[in-house]
Amino acid sequence: MNAAVLRGAALAGLMVVGAAAAAQTVPEDAVTAFTLPNGMEVVVIEDDRAPVVTHMVWYRAGSADEPRGKSGIAHFLEHLMFKGTDEIPSGQFSERIAAQGGSDNAFTSFDYTGYFQRIAADRLDLVMAMEADRMRDLILSEEDVATERQVILEERSQRVDSDPGSVLQEQARAAQFLNHPYGTPIIGWRHEIEGLTRADALDWYARFYAPNNAILVVAGDVTADAVRRLAEARYGPLAPSAGIGERMRPSEPPQLAERRISMADPRVSEPVLQRSYVVPAREPGDPGPAAAMTYLAELLGGSGTTSALARAMQFGAEPTAVYTSAWYDGVALDYGSFGLAVVPPPGVTLERAEAAMDAAIADFLSKPIDPAAFERVRTQLRAAEIYARDDSDGLARRYGAALASGLSVQDVQAWPEALQAVTPEAVRAAAEALDRRRSVTSWLMPEDEASQ
């Protein structure tokens, strides 16, 4: 089964939190935030349990910031950032990190692009100097650009074009967003990737890659004072860029009618039903609605046998699914998303599975929320939040993604409390978003089933 199709599986069923485990977590007072004079935001997460450090630079520039007709340029530049500078020959960046026993990589999302290294704590100055160097001194040859364009086209072939589930997801997202750039794939449309140039990459680099458009997150065996000194020495001399202001994007018009997509492909071994909705993202200073959406996803499609969809479709008298899930993605600059997925067993059509899913949702919405189920989700979320503090690398990603998506350090720290404050009434209010008139329903099926 394709992992991308079934992404967003719910949290593991953690029911208790041991005192010993809690004692190993990173305390909230180990997080320090400050801003350099040139506008670069810095977050330090102190965790001295191992002599390693994660160093991350996040840019407030993702695929949703791209100009029309240049889809994929954010991801393209992410690849090109591993080429050369005056100090580091082309292709040597990752090799130098590996030679020091570290690892590095990068990623692009709709709202941000990030670069990270994980390395021994006494090598922090080295990676910071390297990352600061390529923030302002990237050198690109035409050969570098041509080579990397082919790499990205091949990546698209492997990850999207050769995977029916990924193709359908791409089409469904394009149908979900008629006007907002969240409907354009992060990797880009193939015909537009083919036309990206060296000038396009350098224009993007000059526009967005600057200290006053970046967030530095350092997590591990460090102190805030030491990171401040290093950041001031390495990033501090970089001049801020003029003209970096509020990120303005087209808004999405209200959805007035249900949208449906179906796709048949001989490579599909088992049919899959998905439905997605545009819903509110986490708002700065107001986490309540997003926290309620998190509960809704767990109650409808959480892990195990206790969610509403699982009870009705997997463990009823006549099973209509072998897999069900629901998820909520609320860390986004503009819009959040809520999704459902169902895999029917052999002999059950997608039409029948969808009818059963709709019936299960309607039944859930028509009855009071079971207090025991609600408290079980509360406990699971509390456990998950505590265990999340045990992973400094994960915390670095959590803070970076939040800040790059318009949230603050305070918003991140307030999230666990917001989850514990959710009421059944708030979940009921959140469930009003599950209106089929504002949804996109997708069917993925084997080719032989489409002809029946």
Image: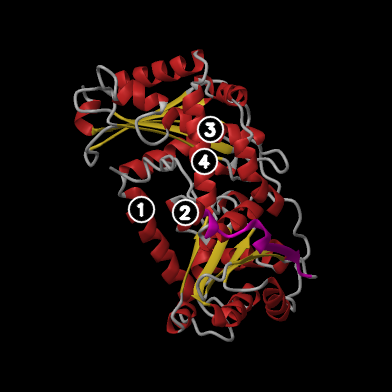
Which segment did they paint magenta? 21-36
Q: Which mark is residue 381?
A: 4
Tell me the residue at 61%/62% (across/down).
58
C-alpha separation, residue under disc 2 versus residue under disc 4: 32 Å
Q: Which of marks 2 and 4 is nearer the N terminus?
A: 2
Tell me the SS state at disc 1: helix
Depth order, front residue of 169/314? 314
Residue marked by disc 2: 187
Q: Answer yes or no: do the residues labelled 3 and 2 have beta carbons within 8 Å?
A: no
C-alpha separation, residue under disc 3 versus residue under disc 1: 31 Å
Q: Which amino acid does label 4 sit on?
A: Leu
Q: Which amino acid does label 3 sit on?
A: Tyr
Residue marked by disc 3: 295
Q: Which amino acid does label 1 sit on?
A: Arg
Tell me the residue at 27%/28% (across/down).
344
Give coordinates of residue 52: x percent, y percent.
51, 74
C-alpha separation, residue under disc 3 versus residue under disc 2: 31 Å
Q: Answer yes or no: do the residues labelled 2 and 1 have beta carbons within 8 Å?
A: yes
Mark 2 neighbour class, 10 Å CA radius: few under 14, some 14 to 19, many 20 or more: many
| Residue 338 appears anywhere in the view | no
Q: Which amino acid does label 2 sit on?
A: Ile
